[in-house]
Every structure is written in structure tokens, then in C-alpha cells.
Image (tube, rainbow, N blue to C red):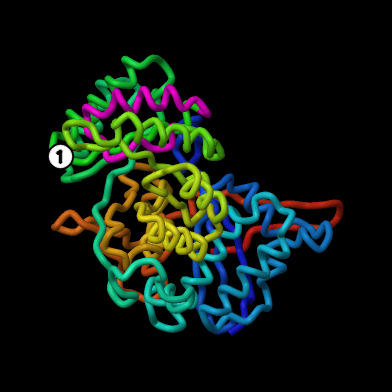
Amino acid sequence: MKIIAVDPFYLRMPDITAAADGTQDTLLVRIRTDTGLEGWGECDASPLVSLAVYCCPMSHGNIINIRTSLIGETLDSPEDVLRLNEKALRNGLDIQQIQHAYSGAEIALWDIIGQKLEQPVYRLLESALGERAYSNKGTSDIAHPKLPYASVLFGDTPEATYRIAAELHEQGYRAAKFGWGPMGKLDEANDIALVRAAREGMGTEAQIMIDAGVVWGTDYDTAYQRAAAFAQFSPTWLEEPLAPDAIDAYGALAGLLKGSGVTKPAHGTGVPIAAGEGSNNYRMAEDLIVHGGIEFVQIDAGRIGGIVPAFQVRQLAEQHGIQYVNHTFKSHLSLAAALHVFATNPDFNLLEYPAAGSELSQRLVTEPLQVDSDGLVRVKELPGLGVRVDTEAIRPYLAPVRIEVGEDTVFEPADF
């Protein structure tokens, strides 16, 4: 079959705030074929910047837009997806946001191939990318359930954080991550109060994760002090205390934690470091794993270039004996793509689950991935990604974009 259309769609809420809430707008990508099959993907990046990567006029042989690379190409097998990935990224070599933008198209390609072959994406991945070299856990034919951790922002105060946590506990969540907001913006006492509130609201049996939102930059000493202070609340991890590219600082922090015993305090609960959502290519994630000393690597398939590079980082995590976790603070279209990446590894058992977000993100697919009665989330045993975009529900959020260069129309939106 042939690719006949690659259509990006910019959707947004009526009002955009400065909150660290990536669900306020999004870029969807639809790919259509001459057989009538179509696939959808979602990018987690600045939507209009990403949209430009789909339509920018060619500057030279290293700046060729994604639509030009894909339209007219043959798409019949997983091998074609790998071939097209290489072509699109090579053609866009000098487009700085190419991996972010291409993520949506790459996910859509897998969605189509899964539908064509009548297989869920996770069953196609390991055969396409080679047998899992670093683990004998699980098989490519079995998807294992994951424990969802509700992913939310800290409240503006410890009291507000407690209320958020108590509500999540009441809803039955056995794990929750609290991030950004005022964390690191005031003083140590306030940071500790926020974490204490999260723990008290969730109860002693639940897992809590703390996302510092890169607030300490390269200051690994402060990050170490906070990790030591937070240890009394038994967090599963401290996430992104430092900037995404602060590899040396991450390595120094890991050395301090291991050398001091903070990772294994007397009460038996460690404070591992998690990071990786800012990795927009495989090499950035590899650097964090190999040189940054992290113990949880968190990858966003909508940022790193799609499902294939996310799967490759999963394999690297298996090799190094650390945990792979998805980063998903978008819709259940992104969540479905993320889950297929590591569904077959039973040891990677945590799933970032968007528990809050805009109406846009909540309405984007027709049948979201539900938390089952046992508190776990399972991949849908359906062809492709297993979810479908609800075009009528999200039509009110469509923001028309038209780009003209001189007398030429470079981009105008397609219809749903």
C-alpha cells in the first residue's frame, strides 16, 4: 500500500496557562493509505514548531520536511517503518526538532502496520527489532499488566497537595506521582511539607513519586540534600531534580547518594533517581543511563522519535539492569503507544497514567485505557495501537493553521 496523505492537526484549549500541563494543546498526526487504512500519532512538544517540520520548504538536502519524505512511499511491513524512519530523519538531519515532530508520524505508521497485519503493535516490535538481547523475561507474545501511578501536579500549598493525594487514594490508586508546582521554588521546609502531604494523603501503603521538575539545574548538592530529607517518606524515586543535559551533575548526585547510604537508609526504602523524559533521541537517554547513574529511565515515545527508539532504550535498560518507565502526560493515544513499548517485560511494571488533564486530552480517544478491577492497566489486544481518535469530540479544539510564503500556500489543514 502507498502513503497518500500525512496530515498534522493543531488542537488547543481556549485558554493556555503557564502551568506545567502538557495537555493544554497537542499536535496529532494522521497518515492515510490508498487502501483506506489510516493511523494516528501524537507529539509531545511545541505543536506549531512541530507542525512546521511537516511542511517547511526545503532549504537543502538536509532540510526536507516529513510529508515530502513519506508521501508516495510503500508501507507494507514493520521493515518499511524502519526504512521510513531512517529516510525521514536523514532528510531532516538539520531540522533541530525533527525527532520530536517525527514521533507522531512514526507512531501512526505502527498503528497502520498493526491494522494491516491484524496484530497489536507490541507483538510486532521484537520481531522487527531483533530478539531481546538482554533479558529472558517474558516473550513477545505476552503482554503483562502494569501498575498505574496517577500523574498529577503538586498543589500550590501542602494543604492543597494533601487534598489531591487523598482524592487519588479514595479513587483507588496504589501509586501517584506529584510534580512541579512550588517544588524547589521556596525553601527546604516547604519542599518537605509538600512531600509529607503527598505521603499522608496517599497513605502508608501506596507508592509516591516526587518530580522536582528540573528545578535545581546543575546543583547536585541541593538535590542530594532534598533526597536525604525526602527519604523519611519512602518515595519510589526523585525525578528530574536536575536539567536534562546535566549528565555530569547526575553522575555526581548518584555518587553522593550511593556513597552516603541515602539510597539504602535504615528503614529499607531507597531514594533512586529517575530521569529521561527530556531525551529527544536515543543517545541522550544512553548518556543518562551510562554516565548519569539513574535507576529509572523515563522515555516519552512522543518526544524521542516514536516507538522504535523508545524500544531501543527499553533494551538498554534491560542491559544495564535499571527500570524502564514511560513518560506520558498527554492523552490515551500517547498512553497506548507508550504501553506497547514495554508491555512484554514483566519486570517493568509501573505505568505513568494521566489522572488529570484538560478536556481535550480526556476526550481524544473513544475508549481510554481503563484501570481494571485489580488496579492494573493492560494493553488492548486489538490491531495497531488499540485506540481510536474521536474526531467529533475533539473537533471544537481544532485550531486552523494556514502558512503562506510569498504567493505559495505551504500548509493548510486537512479535514477530519
Relative to 181, is 163 on the left or the right? left
Name the residue rendered at 14%, 34% in the picture.
203
Residue 388, percent from left and from top: 40, 66
- In the image, 23 versus 181, the foreground residue is 181
Residue 37, percent from left and from top: 50, 78
- In the image, 140 versus 370, the foreground residue is 140
Q: Is 144 placed above or below 402 here?
A: below
Residue 42, percent from left and from top: 50, 57
Name the residue rendered at 55%, 65% in the picture.
106
Location of residue 177 by image quarter: top left
Label 1 CA crowd tier, 10 Å (few <14, some 14–19, many 20+): few
Name the residue rendered at 51%, 52% in the picture.
286
Number of dots carrying numbers: 1
Q: Which region shows up in magenta? A: 217-241
Q: Amino acid at mark 1?
A: Glu
Name the residue furthest right. Answer: 406
Residue 219 in view in this figure: yes
Residue 321, percent from left and from top: 35, 55
Residue 365 in view in this figure: no
**Which quadrant of the figure contains the N terminus?**
bottom right
Q: Is residue 317 magenta?
A: no
Q: Which element is circle 1 on?
A: helix
- In the image, 381 versus 51, the foreground residue is 381
Q: Which residue is mark 1?
A: 170
Q: Is residue 225 magenta?
A: yes
Name the residue rendered at 47%, 37% in the picture.
251
Location of residue 258 by image quarter: top left
Q: Is 305 placed above or below 71 here?
A: above
- In the image, 131 versus 378, the foreground residue is 131
Q: Is 344 placed above or below 317 here?
A: below
